Image (cartoon, rainbow, N blue to C red):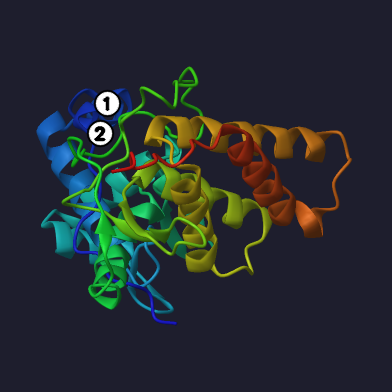
Amino acid sequence: MPRESRPWFRLYGEVLHDRKLAHVARMIGQPRALILGAWASILCLASGSPQRGALLVADGTPYQPDDLAQEIGLDPDLACALVAAFVTLDMLTLTGNTYVVTHWSDRQYESDLSTERSRRSRERSNQATSLQRPSAARATPPQSDPDTESDPDPDPDTDQSVVVSQTTDRTANTGPEMETVYLASDDLIYLIEKAVTDWDPTAEMEPAIQRAFDLWAQARIGESSMLAVTRRALAVTRKRISDNQLNTTHTLRYFFTTLENALQRKRRPKARTPPG
């Protein structure tokens, strides 16, 4: 399957005061603004690469320092010094003959692709009846890592964070009634993608994400509650792995079973329509 293109990448505001960039500026005696511009240019090239995060002109053709000099618009000797400094500070890693942005996967989430996938899913389901629950949609990415954020478990009776999003939404079936709900959570997508990547890289990603959203819809709880239950299921699964009590071939299956059992205990009853 061809890689889905993405015309943008995440650039965090903290980069303006990044200590490593400041150190590079001192190492090679150049203004910090020049170093910042060069680093942003390298991130642009890595984002547009056939293998995101790697500095490749095309498949199998890596950028060399002279190529980077031309792309960025710097003197070749200065570009070589920059690349060497970035490698020294572990900002770039030389893998074989290819430079790779070291922490690319930690800062650029595959869940960022979910908007386009959700749009296609919504188009396929545009004849379905939707049940919409009002709330303010969050259009900005999370500031913390959804895999480690430690929120208290919200009360499902007061948690109203199930949203109809203008940026990322997904249809999910609530159960035998086949009532369609539009749900949105980039954090949940990220958690499921990480579980699949860590525990069963050969599994298809989209069905796993859809399964999690279906379980969420059936539970009829808010986003914060769903994320809290998912994090607990992940923690339980990791504990079983660390205790050598889980066959690695069954890890993802065990996680979903744990998640489903936890959600069944937490499920909010469907509101009944008063008679008459």
**Which residue in the rendered view is the most extreme toward the top?**
152
Residue 66 appearing in the image:
no
Which quadrant does the N terminus fall into?
A: bottom left
Secondary structure of residue under mark 2:
helix
Question: Residue at the location (66% across, 32% down)?
Answer: 235
For residue 188, side relative to residue 19 (left or right): right
For label 1, the SS is loop
- Note whether 157 is above or below 179 in the view shown: above
- Amino acid tagged 1: Asp
Q: Which mark is residue 18?
A: 1
Q: Earlier in the sequence, mark 2 or mark 1?
A: 1
**Residue 268 point in image, percent of width and height:** 48, 35
The image quarter containing residue 161 is: top left
Residue at 19%, 63% in the rendered image: 7
Specify few, some or many for label 2: CA neighbours under 10 Å numbering under 14, 14-19, or 20 or more: few
Residue 139 lies in quadrant: top left
- Give the mark toward the camera: 2 or 1: 1
Q: Position of residue 145 (x, y in %)?
A: 42, 32
Residue 129, quarter of the rendered image: bottom left
Q: Nearer the viewer, residue 83 or 103?
A: 103
Asked if disc 2 and disc 1 are in contact, CB closer than 8 Å, the reply is no
- Pointer 2 residue: 28
Instruction: Give the distance between the C-alpha atoms of the residues marked 2 and 1, in whole angstroms.
Output: 16 Å
**Crowdedness of circle 1 by 10 Å Cα count: few (<14), some, many (20+)?**
few
Looking at the rendered image, the quarter that the C terminus falls into is top left
Q: Residue at x 44, y 27 (%)?
A: 156
